[in-house]
Amino acid sequence: MDQIIVRGNGPLNGEIPIAGAKNACLTLMPATLLTDAPLTLTNAPRLSDIATMTQLLQSLGSEVASLQGGKVLALSSAQISNHTADYDIVRKMRASILVLGPMLARDGHAVVSLPGGCAIGARPVDLHLKALEAMGAELDLRDGYVHAKAPGGRLKGAVINFPFVSVGATENALLAATLAKGTTVINNAAREPEIVDLAQCLRRMGAQIEGEGTSTITIQGVQALGGATHPVVADRIELGTYMLAPAICGGEVECLGGRIDLVGAFCEKLDAAGVSVTETARGLKVSRKNGRVKAVDVVTEPFPGFPTDLQAQMMALLCTADGTSVLEEKIFENRFMHAPELLRMGAKIEVHGGHATVTGVEKLRGAPVMATDLRASVSLILAGLAAEGETVVSRVYHLDRGYEHVEEKLRACGAQIERVKGA
Ligand code: EPZ
């Protein structure tokens, strides 16, 4: 397995292009199943998760062409020739569950493997299933698969009340509702920019949707959807991750394509920590206002709150802050696995349940560390950029799921970072 070697090398200066959002692309791609017309996604990120979703859609009979080095995805599903999403693909990526709603909506039946848990938590899909049942789907869970049918071959509009916010369940319900008979109202809907991006794409395809970005989304089902060309929204998690590079190392980095509206709550915390963020014509310019950053407390919440997907990266910054910070992880039950690895680098962190108390140190020390999940892996790289000496991050396949060419992007700003091909 590949490893990434990072050596602390002082301030970073330069510019980093921000790619299209992984978590938007993973919900936009299944929209091809809703129509026999072509769907073209531009500004697509080149990531292993996108390759996995491509493989899954192709297994269902979709054509997916990766053009311009993967930045453009041309999808078309003249028909769904196979309605079963196999476990061997689904287990690799939980977002695979997002083919369930569209297949049910298009053809009235689908068989999708339950995704199983992952490192950061059990991550059930009960809300996805309850939403589809509310729309008339009959679900039979057996041998690890969801066998779903829509009586009469078509879902019907419904009022869906989510007991708590779920990004994926909102996406599955939204995708399914576009072709349902009648009106669907999703209450307590997720408000993430990726949901807004999905709604804008579906509207381009002819869907009738109102309210995306608020807690209530209303969809009038239509008989059929057409094709569209849609640019994938910028990746706010990649953006936040790279904004932390000059914050932890010093220097000044411009994140090209970054939008301040995508990272509002995150920027409030950066400002409180003493990191300056300036909007430019090309994106966001980030630098430290003066020396060491200050400790700040963080609580992860659904958008527009502080994103859970930036918690690990923020912890890396706070490990070097002047003072003590408390991070509360309220979205996932096990999302502090980066903490033991940061401790190996000399960080001072105490984890109790969903709270991590971080007492900042002047300097971290490089060490061999292990990536455990996508966002934890990049937090170790950020820590390594600011540490004395060498940090070797192993199991970087986690990283490749969500960050394209991370070493090239950081090296362009002066980082000493290289990938060592594993056996
Ligand atoms: C999406 O996951 C993202 N993934 C995650 O990003 C992100 O952390 C998460 O939203 C929260 O923002 C993609 O978009 C592909 P949820 P999702 O449903 O949809 C529980 C990354 O690093 N829940 O909002 O799975 C769930 O266990 C990934 O890019 C249920 O109990 O997240 C969690 O505790 C990691 N039942 C909470 O809700 C359900 O049916 C929020 O999950 C669904 C979710």
Image (tube, grey):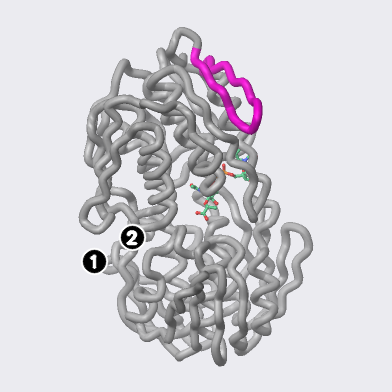
Note whether ligand 1 is within 8 Å of mark 1: no
Secondary structure that dominates the magenta span: strand
Q: Is residue 97 left or right of residue 60?
A: right
Q: Residue at x 39, y 50 (%)?
A: 50
Tell me the mark number nearer the camera, choosing from 1 and 2: 2
Image spot of residue 330 (x, y percent): 66, 52
Q: Is residue 263 above or below residue 139?
A: below
Residue type at tag 2: Ala
Question: How many badges with numbers are in the image?
Answer: 2
Which residue occupies the extreme top position in the image? 152
Which residues make up the magenta segment?
135-150
Q: Residue at x 50, y 73 (%)?
A: 423
Q: Secondary structure at mark 1?
A: loop
Tag 1 residue: 281
Image spot of residue 281 (x, y percent): 23, 66
User: Residue 258 sits in which quadrant?
Assistant: bottom left
Tag 2 residue: 19
Q: Secondary structure at mark 2?
A: loop
Question: Whole-Å distance between the Cαs marked 1 and 2?
Answer: 17 Å
Q: Is residue 11 left or right of residue 257?
A: right
